Image (cartoon, rainbow, N blue to C red):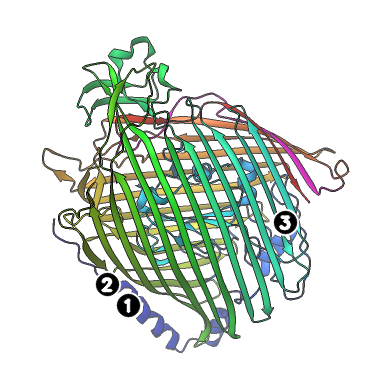
């Protein structure tokens, strides 16, 4: 295939020229006056829990009238007036569109002001919906699916793209490809999860062809110290515990936040468990009205005994134990290679773990972050953040489970890999608020740089054996022989993002990012000798960006459109890129348009978007750790979300997403996958929920949520279908009055039933391991308690 030529986006040059012409035009004074409605000023102040927009005019009146109508069961936090403190938070809207998503824009825009589809899932929503891990959070979002087991802890799919085509960020910082660096993460220490749909390279850099997901830690606030504690236990004998505290100290201007959480989550398969520990803290120190410094530290650890799925087996072999509604189709194994014919999941394997007895998945991660915010002038603000990250990870498992029709047994293969990762970097922003010929304008210039050192010992041999399908002798890993790979990556980027208000209701938003990526790779054999064609070096210089508009046609009703581009490495993983693989960039672009509407006195909100995404020069998993090349991947779809409170006690919400994702020009020796759907991409995903609150002396709320996920395929061949499924949860909680616990401001007891119909379903399929399917968890019961004081 010919190399991809990086085309500088002329649309941005044309847009810049248009802006200059408009700014210089002799517009009527009345229009210029209308245009002067600036963004909220950039304030150097202690961070609030989650910044919300400051409403003005009619919207502000709506927010004030709705201040007593917060989400059911959540009392408003006190907002004391502290000298020098930032403006207090405004009332969240039904879809949280007042939130500022820093992973979507550096301009300080709210979700409604951003010309893109953005979701911000708050800590309050995570608590109310019972989201325990970030996989749970993703599955409640619009059109997002995720893996849900220790083997695939944070595998995401949205808008037709999966795994490393979606950037995962930690407080806005990328650490590497999602499918290599993501770990299972508890939500207890998180303030919010931000989801930006579509190519997102402008903010998060290389790799964000499908979008970006940002995990935001809880932040210090200015005011009295507030503490919280949470506990839960479920019928699988899992438990979670969390304690957090934050507020102002006795030192003038010094605020803090501290959180510690511990969980032990047992899986439904035999001998599966994931233990996590997360300790995080941050200090904000306001030295003066114009200068704030801050520092943060976090330690995360997870240890798992993993489940890697249930093997596909022939219907003819399972007989009366064959199941319907989980998988369907035919399959020829790429591992043994057995022709299984029509396939099924044997009901005797629902809880079977084929992993070796001494399996383990372990990760230890440390974050150090610090920086300052300095107001150089009334219209000029400088922010800088330095960070250091270190991680040690290892996988020591049997990961292949392939049914063999010749022996009627399950063939297994071991896999080992470890990571030693070190990352240091800096992000510096300069924000300039200006007036151009009577039009308010905000420009943010960002300079970022990072250096990453990555050492990857891996298996040089893959021990294997065969075990019974129904009663496997799991055994042990066996002899391990290792070899080593290294990757050193330096990254520098300069970006510009601008918002120009042409009228009070119409704004142009655009940005440009110029990035340099340098890669040095080496690989050695078991004797420590360099492999052929190693070491090698390569560099790239992608130019990406976004141009769009927002138009508030009437108060609360905003239309938007955007054109955005992205870039990532063609072989899908910069850490593993080989010297003989084509080293061109993959490019992506999207056209998107939509509407966001807040109305009915802040009691109802809905949003709609339609998009067209194209990604060129795509590498795709072909099983057995091999890659095929697909010339193009196309994705078109629509998303709709809504939430309404028709009467005070009742809340209704729902979302639905439709996507048509296809490969094009995907030809290889022996066949073609052109027209096929990428793995783990359902055509339809829908969520819905309802809750009703009884305002009794001990307030009680009951609720139900449902989720539908359409058919998906586990490989590019599209011969095995993971069938559509519908699951639901029910819950009830009671808020205990303060008169019961005088020292506690809020106390809540919750009972929740997950998957209350006990549906058996396929949740994910790893295209590198196509002989097996990951099953979703069965019905479980959970009790939890939460306290705030």
CB of mark 2 within 8 Å of CB of mark 1?
yes
Q: Which residue is mark 1?
A: 13
Q: Where residue 257 sits in the image (x, y, percent)?
A: 67, 60
Could you say which quadrant of the image residue 716 lies in? top left
State how far apart marks 2 and 1 are (Cα).
Answer: 9 Å
The local crowd at label 2, few if under 14, some if 14 to 19, many if 20 or more residues have their Cα within 10 Å, is few
Residue plotted at (77% across, 43% down): 747
Q: Which residues are magenta?
A: 743-769
Q: In which quadrant of the rendered view does residue 315 lie?
A: top left
In the rendered view, tell whether residue 675 sits above or below residue 196.
above
What residue lies at 71% left-to-right and 46% top-to-bottom?
229
Residue count near mark 1 (Cα–Cα under 10 Å), binned few <14, some 14–19, many ≥20: few
Q: Which residue is mark 2?
A: 8
Could you say where residue 769 lies in the image, as x and y percent from the top left? 30, 35
The answer to which of marks 1 and 3 sits earlier in the sequence is 1
- Observer-nearest residue: 42 or 773? 773
């Amino acid at each position: 295939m010919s190399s991809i030529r990086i085309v500088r986006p002329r649309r941005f040059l044309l847009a810049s020229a248009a802006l200059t012409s408009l700014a210089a035009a002799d517009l009527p004074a009345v229009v210029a006056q209308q245009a002067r409605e600036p963004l909220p000023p950039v304030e150097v102040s202690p961070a609030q829990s989650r910044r919300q927009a400051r409403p003005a005019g009619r919207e502000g009146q709506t927010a004030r009238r709705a201040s007593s109508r917060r989400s059911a069961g959540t009392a408003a936090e006190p907002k004391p007036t502290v000298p020098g403190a930032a403006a207090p938070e405004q009332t969240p809207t039904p879809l949280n569109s007042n939130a500022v998503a820093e992973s979507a824009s550096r301009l300080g825009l709210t979700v409604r002001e951003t010309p893109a589809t953005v979701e911000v899932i708050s800590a309050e929503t995570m608590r109310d919906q019972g989201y325990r891990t970030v996989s749970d959070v993703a599955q409640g979002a619009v059109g997002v699916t995720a893996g849900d087991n220790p083997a695939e802890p944070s595998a995401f799919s949205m808008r037709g793209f999966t795994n490393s085509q979606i950037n995962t960020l930690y407080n806005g910082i990328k650490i590497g490809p999602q499918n290599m660096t993501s770990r299972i993460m508890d939500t207890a220490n998180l303030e919010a999860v931000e989801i930006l749909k579509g190519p997102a390279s402008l903010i998060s850099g290389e790799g964000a062809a499908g979008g970006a997901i940002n995990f935001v830690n809880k932040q210090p606030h200015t005011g009295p110290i507030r503490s919280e504690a949470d506990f839960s236990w479920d019928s699988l004998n899992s438990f979670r515990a969390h304690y957090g505290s934050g507020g102002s100290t006795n030192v003038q201007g010094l605020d803090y936040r501290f959180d510690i959480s511990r969980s032990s989550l047992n899986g439904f398969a035999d001998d599966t468990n994931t233990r996590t520990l997360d300790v995080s803290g941050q200090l904000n120190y306001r030295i003066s009205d114009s200068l704030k410094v801050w520092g943060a530290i976090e330690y995360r650890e997870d240890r798992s005994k993993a489940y890697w799925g249930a093997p596909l087996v022939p219907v003819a072999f399972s007989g009366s134990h064959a199941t319907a509604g989980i998988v369907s189709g035919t399959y020829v194994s790429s591992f043994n290679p057995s022709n299984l014919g029509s396939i099924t999941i044997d009901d005797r394997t629902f809880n079977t773990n084929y992993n070796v007895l001494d399996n383990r998945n372990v990760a230890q991660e440390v974050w150090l972050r610090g920086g300052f915010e300095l107001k150089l002038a009334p219209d000029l603000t400088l922010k800088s953040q330095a960070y250091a990250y270190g991680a040690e990870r290892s996988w020591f498992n049997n990961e292949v489970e392939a049914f063999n029709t010749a022996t009627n047994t399950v063939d297994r293969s071991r896999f080992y890999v470890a990571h030693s990762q070190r990352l240091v970097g800096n992000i510096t922003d300069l924000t300039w608020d200006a007036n151009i010929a009577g039009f308010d304008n905000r420009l943010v210039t960002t300079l970022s740089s990072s250096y990453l050192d990555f050492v990857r010992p891996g298996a040089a041999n893959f021990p294997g054996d065969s075990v019974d399908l129904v009663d496997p002798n799991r055994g042990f890993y066996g002899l391990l022989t290792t070899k080593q790979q290294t990757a050193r990556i330096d990254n520098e980027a300069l970006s510009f993002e601008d918002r120009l208000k042409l009228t009070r209701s119409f704004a142009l938003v655009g940005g440009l990012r110029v990035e340099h990526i340098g890669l040095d790779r080496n690989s050695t054999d078991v004797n420590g000798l360099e492999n052929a064609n190693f070491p090698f070096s390569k560099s790239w210089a992608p130019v990406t960006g976004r141009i769009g508009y927002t138009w508030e046609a009437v108060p609360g009703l905003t239309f938007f459109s955007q054109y955005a581009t992205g870039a990532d490495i063609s072989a899908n993983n910069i850490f593993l890129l080989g010297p003989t693989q084509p080293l061109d960039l993959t490019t992506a672009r999207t056209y998107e348009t939509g509407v966001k509407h807040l109305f009915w006195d802040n009691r109802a909100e809905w949003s709609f978007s339609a998009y067209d995404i194209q990604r060129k020069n795509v590498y795709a998993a072909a099983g057995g750790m091999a890659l095929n090349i697909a010339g193009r991947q196309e994705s078109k779809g629509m998303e709709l979300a809504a939430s309404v409170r028709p009467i005070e006690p009742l809340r209704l919400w729902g979302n639905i997403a439709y996507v048509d994702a296809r490969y094009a020009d995907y030809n290889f020796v022996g066949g073609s996958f052109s027209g096929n759907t990428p793995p783990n991409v359902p055509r339809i995903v829908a969520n819905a929920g309802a809750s009703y609150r009884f305002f009794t002396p001990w307030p009680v709320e009951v609720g139900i949520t449902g989720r539908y996920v359409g058919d998906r395929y586990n490989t590019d061949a599209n011969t095995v279908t993971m069938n559509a499924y519908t699951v639901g949860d029910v819950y009830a909680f009671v808020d205990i009055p303060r008169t019961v616990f005088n020292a506690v401001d809020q106390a809540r007891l919750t009972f929740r039933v997950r998957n209350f119909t006990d549906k058996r379903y396929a949740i994910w399929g790893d295209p590198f391991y196509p002989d097996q399917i990951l099953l979703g968890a069965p019905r479980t019961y959970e009790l939890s308690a939460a306290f705030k004081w």
